[in-house]
Image (spheres, helix red, strand yellow):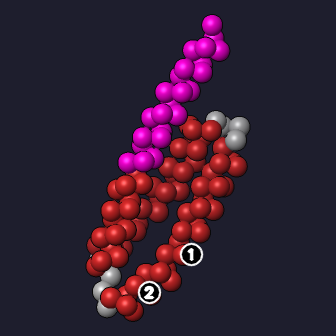
């Protein structure tokens, strides 16, 4: 099934990208703490998402509206993350340039 393939692709992406992004944003010394916070937030989202999805299915008799809401929220959050990541890198470069002088 397509969902199984997507899940198989998504799991390694999450397990690899979270430590890399947290190290890049917060430094290697605080990588463990920041990655732990990211994983805790992701786990909390999964804990909340399953009952909400089941409740939405009971009310709407379909997962389709919830799917589109989730897809829209994902696109919005990825855009916000990329914007914040760009700002963080800009500020990091400014800080390092001022520190070197």
Quadrant where the image shows the C terminus: top right
Name which residue lies at 47% across and 63% down: 11
Contact? badges 1 and 2 (CB < 8 Å): no
Label 2: state its secondary structure.
helix
Query: Is residue 74 at least partly visible in the picture?
Result: yes
As drawn, the residue found furthest toward the top would be: 101
Q: Quadrant of residue 70?
A: bottom left
The residue that label 2 is drawn on is 54
Residue stretch in magenta: 79-101
Residue 17 sits above or below residue 52 on the image = above
Quadrant where the image shows the N terminus: bottom left
In-front residue for pair 4/27: 27
| CA gap, disc 1 and disc 2 | 12 Å
Query: Is residue 6 at least partly visible in the picture?
Result: no
Label 1: state its secondary structure.
helix
Left or right of residue 31: residue 48: left
Left or right of residue 15: residue 69: left
- Residue 37 lies, in percent from the top left, at 65, 55
The residue that label 1 is drawn on is 47
- Residue 77 lies, in percent from the top left, at 42, 54
Name which residue lies at 38% across and 48% down: 79
């Amino acid at each position: 099934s397509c969902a199984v393939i997507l899940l198989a692709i998504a799991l390694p992406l999450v397990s690899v990208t979270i430590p890399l992004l947290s190290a890049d944003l917060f430094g290697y010394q605080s990588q463990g703490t920041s990655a732990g916070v990211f994983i805790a937030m992701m786990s909390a989202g999964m804990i909340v998402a399953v009952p909400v999805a089941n409740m939405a299915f009971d009310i709407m008799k379909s997962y389709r509206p919830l799917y589109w809401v989730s897809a829209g929220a994902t696109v919005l959050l990825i855009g916000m993350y990329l914007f914040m990541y760009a700002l963080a890198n800009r500020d990091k470069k400014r800080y390092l340039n001022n520190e070197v002088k």
